[in-house]
Image (spheres, grey):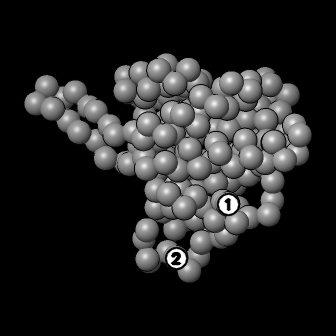
Amino acid sequence: MRSDVADVRPENLQANEISLAEIELLVLDFDGVMTDNRVLVDQHGIESVFCHRGDGWGLAQLRKIGFEVLVLSTEANPVVRARCEKLRIGCIQDCSNKLERLKKLASERSLNASRIAYVGNDVNDLECMQWVGVPIAVADAEPEILEVSRFVTRKRGGYGAVREVCDKILSDRKHADV
């Protein structure tokens, strides 16, 4: 955990009393949320990333109840698409204006922003996080992201943060009988 931002962190995800039961869409950034924000590049320029298998389990549990999850990424990289395909979640990548695309997506699905949770870690997530009803930061997010978040995961991006969010949604929905 980054000690330089500990004093600006809102309550952690599990301790917060606000329920995620009413959320209808979970949007995830990819790099730094589903990964640990590192990239491995081989001598041929092929990129690889590290993801947490527990995140995949949590996403599978959401998928079982018909809950929609998608990745919204500025990155244009086959690794993003491949991971999303493996997890069977939606993927929008090579997105130069994330907020515009998210608003369009919400309109197409007749979703109110208050029913959308967005998990981010870096400044390119800021506008989306300011627009949605439930902005969530991973533990090692940039200070600007921590400041606008309603929740902060205990775990860092790529180390189970997505699983933590999935578990919270499932728990809150179970207790609310959604």
User: Would residue 176 appear left or right of 145 to someone viewing this image?
Assistant: right
**Tag 2 secondary structure:** helix
Residue 131 location in percent, x, y? 73, 49
Q: Which residue is most to the bottom?
A: 7
Return the residue nearer the eye: 127 or 79: 79
Residue indicated by mark 2 = 6
Residue 4 in sight in this render: yes
Q: Which residue is most to the left?
A: 43
Residue 118 in sight in this render: no
Q: Which residue is most to the right?
A: 177
The correct choice, above or below, for 11 with respect to 76 in the image is below
Residue drawn 22% across the image and 27% down it:
46
> Rounded to the nearest whole Å, what is the CA distance between mark 2 and mark 1?
17 Å
Residue 10 location in percent, x, y? 65, 70
Q: Quadrant of the C terminus?
A: top right
Point out the tag, 2 or 1, that comes first from the N-terminus.
Answer: 2
User: Would residue 45 appear left or right of 93 to someone viewing this image?
Assistant: left
Residue drawn 66% across the image and 59% down it:
13
**Which residue type carries mark 2?**
Ala
**Which residue type carries mark 1?**
Gln
User: Would residue 132 appear left or right of 93 to someone viewing this image?
Assistant: right
**Tag 1 secondary structure:** loop
Q: Quadrant of the N terminus?
A: bottom left
Residue 69 location in percent, x, y? 65, 31
Residue indicated by mark 1 = 14
The correct choice, above or below, for 9 with respect to 49 in the image is below
Residue drawn 79% across the image and 63% down it:
17
* Image depth: mark 2 or mark 1 in front: 1
The correct choice, above or below, for 49 with respect to 123 in the image is above
Q: Kindly identify which numbered label has been placed on residue 63.
A: none
Residue drawn 84% across the image and 47% down it:
175
